[in-house]
Image (cartoon, helix red, strand yellow):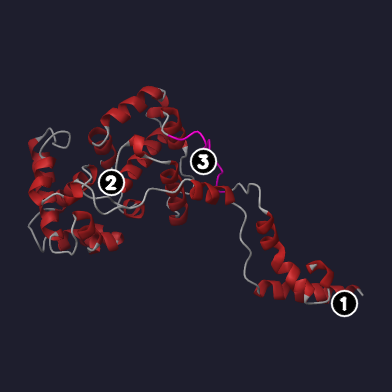
Amino acid sequence: MKSRVHDMTGAARTQAADQPRAPHAVGSVMRQAQVQFPARFAETHWAMTSASAEEVISALDRPPFRAEKRHTQWERRSGARAILAWLSGSPGATWQERWEASPGSAEPGRWAKEGHVWVRTAADARWCGIRAGLSLMAVADVLRLPLEWQFSNPSGHLRALTERSRDPEGFTRLEGIVPPKHWTSHGGNRSRLVLTRIMLAKGGGLADITPGDAFEYVTTVRAASHDTVSSTLFYSWLRELGHLPADAPVTLCFLHRITGQLSCEQLIDRHRCAVDALAGHGWGDLSR
């Protein structure tokens, strides 16, 4: 009898393995939160990206984007002008649409190796100027760089430039709330980088970051395996600033690991595969 039961359950396990996998419950709280608080949609039309090339260059020549050193400003300006000339050959009604149609956006892994070759087909510029020009265009909200692109092309200067030029008032207020030792700590620097990355991907300032933007960042980081222990301190800072709705999750810690309360349908889906397999081998009462 024991061997019969063993045979049946063994066969049942084999058949269950062939069944479609039931919905995984771990992290369901994060998925529910993303439904309730979706991330901002990736737009392609807004004021700065719809401006003409000369209007863009003129904006980059004015505060808060103008560099204090003349050589730095010249380098950024020449790089931005070269990128605009290159993107003019791509289809689209805005600079964002043209960027997304270019290989620079489609293949972020190749940008660091071949970006200067692509851009110099349209205008002569040094690679350091091209990189500086693209950073300034991103900070000025001419272009928005997806998180995956930023992960593939990290910059040691982009965070400081964004804090200083995109939303200086917001970061000054945040610095006044955060204890000094935390602001300059390793975790604090990482959290400031996260905030600037979200702003460069979605547009706006600190006050415009939504819970959904934060959830999307953490999920994207985990999927890309760039930082499996990504700091969630930035989310607590946003809450302290009063920028998050009262019904948003209090913290991001372990949100991917929490199951939460499952509905009746979810419970049935999780166990249906095994029940159906056993029922097909004489355990019919289990499916009733």
- From the viewer's side, name the closer residue of 259 and 190: 259
Q: What range of the chain is rendered magenta?
A: 244-256
Callout 1: few (<14), some (14-19), or many (20+) C-alpha neighbours within 10 Å?
Answer: few
Q: Main secondary structure of the magenta part?
A: loop
267 in the magenta segment: no
Q: Is there CB contact under 8 Å for labels 1 and 3?
A: no
Query: Of label 2 and label 3, which has the lower sequence position?
Result: 2
251 in the magenta segment: yes
Quadrant of the frame with the C terminus: bottom right
Q: What's the residue type where badge 1 is placed?
A: Arg
The residue under label 2 is 155
Residue at coordinates 16% horizontally, 37% vertically from top-left? 65
The residue under label 3 is 252
Q: What's the residue type where badge 2 is placed?
A: Ser
Residue at coordinates 12% horizontally, 53% vertically from top-left? 126
Per the image, label 1 sits on a secondary structure element best described as helix
110 shown above or below 51:
below
- From the viewer's side, name the closer residue of 287 and 181: 287
Which circle marks residue 4 in the picture?
1
